[in-house]
Image (tube, helix red, strand yellow):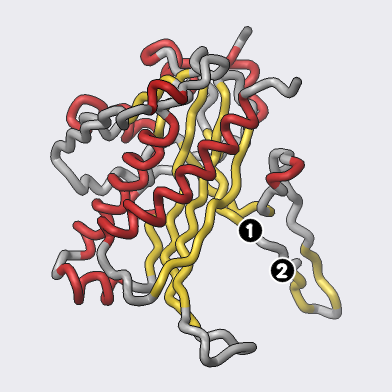
Amino acid sequence: MDTGIALGFLTVIFFFNPYSGLHSQTTIGHPTKPGSEIKRDVSTKKHKILLVPLEPKMYMSEIDHKLNGETHWSQQKIKAVFRDGIDDQLYQHLKPHFNVLSLLDDTLKYKKDILKIYQYLSYKYQPVPDQKNYQAPKNEKEKSGINKGQIMVETRSDARFMNAKITNPSLVPELFAKYKTDVFLFINQLNLSAGMASASDPTKAPERTLTLHYTAYTVDAKEINSGIAECHFPVDVNNPTKINAVYVAKLAEEICKRLQKALIPAH
C-alpha cells in the first residue's frame, strides 16, 4: 500500500507552533493492571497504537483558579498533570486490547518526534460525529457573500469538536517505519468548563463539564474514529490528580470502546 498517496487527501495547511516544553524530561511508567491479561482481546492485538499527547496550547480551562486554590500548583503544573494523566489513562485502558506506545514514556527520547508531529498538525472545528453510526466528518465549504453591501458569513449552531489534520503526507509513513504503529490516536483539546446552575432546577447542585477532543487515524490515512468524550464532575472536586483518576478515566474507557468497535470487523 502506498501510504504517501493514501495520505494525500488530507487537507494541507502548514501550521507551526513549537512545543512549549513543560518538562525537560518526563518518564511515565505504564504498568499493566492486575488481571488485565485475562481480558486481552486477541483480535485487536495485531494493532499497535501510537498515543500523541495533548499539545499544551490546546488545554482550555475555566477553573484553574479553583484548582490552584486547593493544590497551590502553578498553571503550568496543572496543565502538565492533566496532559500526563490523559496519556496514562488512555494507556491503561487501551493496553489490555492493543499494543500501545506512548510518546510521554520518555519525553527526552521522543521529544524530536513530538515536536515534528505538532509542527505538521492543523486543527479545525467540525461537526461532532454520531458514534452510533460513525462517519468521519467531511470538509465543509464556508458560505459567505455580500447582501445589500454587507458581508455575510454563515453561522453554525450544531455541536462541534476540534479535529486534527495531518499536513505532511510523509509524517505517518515515517512514524510507521520507526515505531511499527498502524493506528495513531491524537489528543486534540481538553476543555474544563465551570459549573452552572440548572435553569429548570435551581436547587440542583451545579456540575462542571470535562470534554476531551480526539482523532484516530490508521496508517493508510483513514479517520476511523473522532469526536468528543465528555462527562460531568462536581464543583467541589479541585484536585487534577483525582479528576484524572476518576473522570478522565471514564473518558479513556469510552474512547477505548470506540476504537475497539472501529478496529474489530463486524461479524
Residue occupying the point 77% across, 78% down: 150
Task: State the CA–CA distance, disc 1 to disc 2.
Answer: 9 Å
Judged left or right of residue 152, residue 39 is left
**82 lies above or below 218:** below
Depth check, front residue: 194 or 264: 264
Find residue 157 and name its label. Answer: 2
For the point 23% across and 64% down, which residue is it?
A: 75
Instruction: Judge from the rendering whether residue 155 lies leftward or rightward of residue 237; answer left or right.
Output: right
Compared to residue 34, the image places residue 178 above or below, namely: above
Mark 1 element type: strand
Residue 229 in view in this figure: yes
Q: Which quadrant of the figure contains the N terminus?
A: top right
Identify the residue position indicated by label 1 in the image. 160
Q: Nearer the viewer, residue 112 or 257?
A: 257
Residue 211 vs 227, above or below: the answer is: below
- Inspect the image, locate mark 2, and give the three-letter code of the amino acid beneath it: Ser
- Label 1: few (<14), some (14–19) or many (≥20) C-alpha neighbours in 10 Å: some
Residue drawn at (50%, 60%) of the image:
231
Q: Between residues 103 and 256, which one lies in front from this camera angle?
A: 256
Q: Position of residue 41 (x, y in %)?
A: 52, 21
- Measuring 63% from the left and 16% from the top, which residue is drawn there? 5
Residue type at mark 1: give it. Answer: Arg
| Above or below 14: residue 71 | below
